[in-house]
Amino acid sequence: MASLNLGLSLSRKKNVSRNAAVERKNLITVCRFSVKTLIDRSCFETIDDSAPEFLNFASILEQILSHRLKGQLTWFGYESPRSFWDYIRVACSKVSHSCICSIENMENVSSSRAKGRAWIRVALMEKRLSEYITAALRDYKTTRRFYDDGAIVLGEEANMLAGMLLGLNAIDFSFCLKGEGLDGSFPAVIDYTPYLKFTQSSDSISSDEEELRTLGSSGSESSTPENIGPPFIMDENSWYNKCKRVEQKYRLALEQKGYLEELVRLREVQLSDSVSQSKLLTQRIKDIDLNHKLEKEQLEYIIVELQDQLKSFQSLGHLSADASLSQISFDAGQSQDGSGKQDSSHLSEGKEETPSLLGLCGSLTSVASYKSLTSLKSSECLASPTTEMTSPGLTPS
């Protein structure tokens, strides 16, 4: 019983190692295909975030760098998930003139996975992605500390990866570091559809039908008693081989069917998310339009009130101008009357010495007084009327 359990554990380990080797080989092969498609696409147009070839390449590279990545141990002994950016940040810290510090200080990128995706884009625009990968792989202690056994970066495939990425230096990339591609909440999904090749033709269909026909005929012949002996053994071997081939084809078709179903499911999830986001955006646009209409109505109401106030201010200005004009005319009339009275009083009292003031202030009362004033002007030394009245031997004229 112990030997049986030991054999089962050994077989499980062999299966796990074989699956890991197959996974590493598939990822490297798909990465080579994606690099080739990127180079072919760059001959016709500029590569940016909207190119499906780049999105697929970024997902493949993220899967390669995250292959068998160790988790981070907490104080309580639990293992939390870790992103490949933690490894790149430490392993590429000694690269001269690197973009590690600038990406670490980016404000719009918060999660570790989003920073790793931003690093891939910046390294491609700098044409230094192969240099960063080579420098990280040279730091074997750091690589060993971050990855488990069987990881791609710890195997021989890592050198192949650095060589493949060297061809991307001939491409001019143009990326926006504020787009949805940097969102760390969505996992990296690889689309294997461009690399699948379905070569099922009429010849293959006819060969499958022939194999099935031969299988049926061999089964019917084996049921007869004449087929006992060596021919029966040969027919059994050929039947077994043909069954194995059909089984392999069936498993391959089943795996492709499962992959396509999973791809359809992912596309349906993405479609439902897009529909919900479009509904939210539509509702937001409606709310914004409603707010704009309300603000427009309020502004129109304010403009009408301001126009009414301006009209009232203009009418009040006209009234105040008329009132000021009337007040000025009234004051001028009063000033003329008062000046006439004052001049007459000055003339009667004899306090005014020059007749020019009488002409400016008001009209004269009589021509006789005007003549007496001109006669007074002709004398060089004029005496005041009061002195003339008081001086002895003089009588008033």
Image: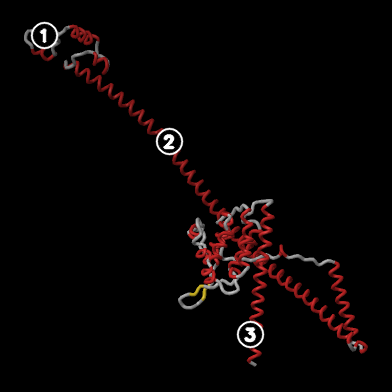
In the image, 293: left or right of 323? right
CA–CA distance between discs 1 and 2?
A: 65 Å
Q: Nearer the viewer, mark 1 or mark 2?
A: 2
Three-letter code, disc 2: Ser
Please tell me how crowded label 2 is: few (under 14), some (14-19), or many (20+) other residues with Cα within 10 Å. Answer: few
Crowd class of label 1 (few under 14; some 14 to 19; many from 20; radius 10 Å):
few
- Secondary element type, mark 3: helix
Q: Which residue is mark 1?
A: 395
Q: Nearer the viewer, mark 3 or mark 2?
A: 3
**Labels 1 & 2 near each other (Cβ < 8 A):** no
Image spot of residue 170 (x, y percent) = 63, 53
- Residue 107 position in % (x across, y down): 49, 58
Task: Identify the residue position indicated by label 2 in the image.
Answer: 315
Badge number at residue 9: 3
Q: Which mark is residue 344?
A: none
How many angstroms separate mark 3 from mark 2 (CA)?
103 Å
Q: Looking at the image, is mark 1 or mark 2 earlier in the sequence? A: 2
Q: Secondary structure at mark 2?
A: helix
* Quadrant hosting residue 227: bottom right
Which residue appears at 69% of the width and 68% of the height?
A: 263
Kindly identify the amino acid type of the residue bearing the numbered disc 1. Answer: Thr
Q: Quadrant of the N terminus?
A: bottom right
